[in-house]
Structures are given as structure tokens and as C-alpha cells.
Image (spheres, rainbow, N blue to C red):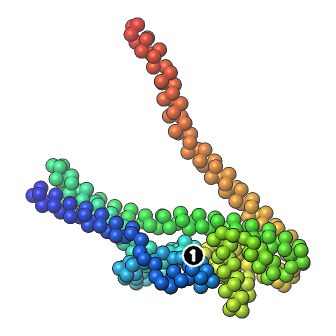
Amino acid sequence: MVIPLVLLAGAMLGAGLWLLLFSLLPARPSLAASLARLRGDGSAPAADWPSQATRPWQRQLGRAAEQAGQAVGLEFGGIRKDLAITGQPLDAHLAAKVVYALAGGLGGLVLAGLLAAAGVQVPVVLPVWVALGFALIGFLLPDRRLRAAASARRASLRYAVGALLNLVAINLAGGAEVEQALYNALRISHGWAFTLLRNTIRRAQLNREKLWEALGRLGEELDVDDLVQLAQNVALAGDEGARMREALIAMAATIGSRELAEAETQANEASEHMVLPLTVLAIGFTLFLLYPALMQLTIGF
């Protein structure tokens, strides 16, 4: 009975490793994505950076998972916004969730099989619960990584919006119109966030759309409130103009103050996390200094 369990555990371990390796190998980008990347003419997806290429099996598995989720009422609204700002397709993300869940479940069964092969008495229910727990962890792991990446992207975009506000206010003070102030501010700026804003405005111009409407829609798609507020202020500037320089400067100061407060909070959290390691290090150093004296006292007694 032990040999079949060992063979089953080895087969499951090999299948799990194969699934993980095959899912982590980068796929070859499509010709359209490569041409869009070379042109750099704003014809890329909404996030304006090359999206990750997906394999046929990833698309099929992801679409099947999406249809299954929609059948039970899931719309993946929050995930879609995180995917939009990170440039990842939904089908690849859902396929990764399924693959990680299968790998986690197989890992739990393999662990139970190895314990049984080692002679440990394992209840029948325990491998099932372990497999389900590992599968749940694997299913949620891609979401955690996606949220972290999307949070970092949004922070960079908010910083770019604050810098853009200062540049637009300077151009407005020089007598430029709202649209010209935006063009001037974005033309001298660099980075993926400014490229995203610049291409958004360029597409709005080609589609004969109001710039602030395009910026506001982009902020809603990417879930960036500062960008939506910027679009509202630019819309007011297009109507009133004269009083918008002070409003833009005030908004830039608000964004800067919030970013400074967030940076201080992160620094305080990092300092708190360092308390325990420093305490352990101080105790160890104290014991190292006191060890010879303690040994002498012990020998003397």
C-alpha cells in the first residue's frame, strides 16, 4: 500500500511542478503588440504599455473561468481596474489563479502522501482539508500580487498628477490656454505615467473629445481619484480660466501633503517592524558580553 502512495505522490508532485513551470514561462508576444510597442503612437491598450502576451491555453482557461464566474454573478470589477493599470489581461490572471489553485491542491495531496509513505498515520479527512487549504492559498496568491502591483502603479500615477498640476499652473500663469498648458506640461515630462496621460490626451484630440472628459474616464477606469479630480478642475479651467491657477496649486499642495503623510506613516511602520530584531540583537549582544563572567562565577561555585 505504501508503494502506490509514493508513486501517486511523485506523480502529483511532477504534475504540480510542470503546471507551475509552464505557467511561469513567458509567452511570445503577438505581432500586433510588438508593432504597437515599436510605433509608440498611442495605439497600445488603455494603460499604454505592452500587455503581457498570453498562450492559447491561458486564454481558453481564463475565458472558461470568467464565464464560470459570471454564471454565479461575479463581474471582476475591482480586478479589471487593477489589471488595467498593470497592463495584464484578465484571461491570463484568471488562468494563473486556476493553475496556482490546482498546484496548491496537488501539493497538499503530495504532502499527505509523503507522510503516509513515512509511516505516519494520517486520517482520511486530513489530506482533503490540507489540499483545500493549499488550493485556497494558491487561488488567492495572484490577487495579492496584483493588488500590490496596482497599488504601486497608482501611487506613481498620483505623484505624476501632482507634478503635472504644478506644471499646468505655471503655464496658466504664463498666459497659456488650458489645452496648451496641458500639452506644454506633458511634452517636457518623462516616465510611463506621463506617457499614459500624454497618449490619452492625444487620442482625445484625434477623436475630437474634450480633454478633461478623457482624463476623467481614464481615472475612473484605473480607479485614480486624483486624476478624476484633475479632470474636473481642468473642466472648470476651461470655463472660468482666471481663477484656476490657485485651484490647481491648492490641489497640488493637497496631493503633496497626502503623499508626505503616507511616506511618514510607512517610515513609522518600518521603524516599528525593526523594534523586535533590534531587541533580539541587543539581548544576544548582552549575553555575549556576560557569558565569560557567568562562566567564571559558575566555575567558582
Would you identify the image quadrant in which residue 291 lies? top left
Q: Is residue 116 above or below residue 51?
A: above
Instruction: Tell me the element at label 1.
Output: loop
The image position of residue 63, as x and y in percent, is: 40, 82
Residue drawn at 50 percent across, 67 percent down: 146
Would you identify the image quadrant in which residue 41 lies? bottom right
The image position of residue 191, as x and y in percent, is: 66, 69
Residue drawn at 54 percent across, 76 percent down: 50
| Residue 27 horizontal side relative to residue 111, left or right | right
Residue drawn at 34 percent across, 61 percent down: 134
| Direction top: furthest residue | 300
Q: Is residue 142 above or below residue 300?
A: below
| Direction front: furthest residue | 38
Q: Which residue is mark 1?
A: 49
**Residue 101 seen by the camera:** no
Q: Is residue 67 above or below residue 222?
A: below
The quadrant of the picture occupied by the N terminus is bottom left
The image position of residue 124, as x and y in percent, is: 19, 59
Question: Mark 1 belongs to which amino acid?
Answer: Trp
Residue drawn at 18 percent across, 53 percent down: 116
The image position of residue 126, as x and y in percent, is: 25, 57
The quadrant of the picture occupied by the C terminus is top left
Would you identify the image quadrant in which residue 138 lies? bottom left
How busy is the neighbourhood of tag 1: few (under 14 within 10 Å), some, or many (20 plus)?
many
Between 187 and 214, the residue placed more toward the observer is: 187
| Direction bottom: furthest residue | 208
**Residue 137 seen by the camera:** yes
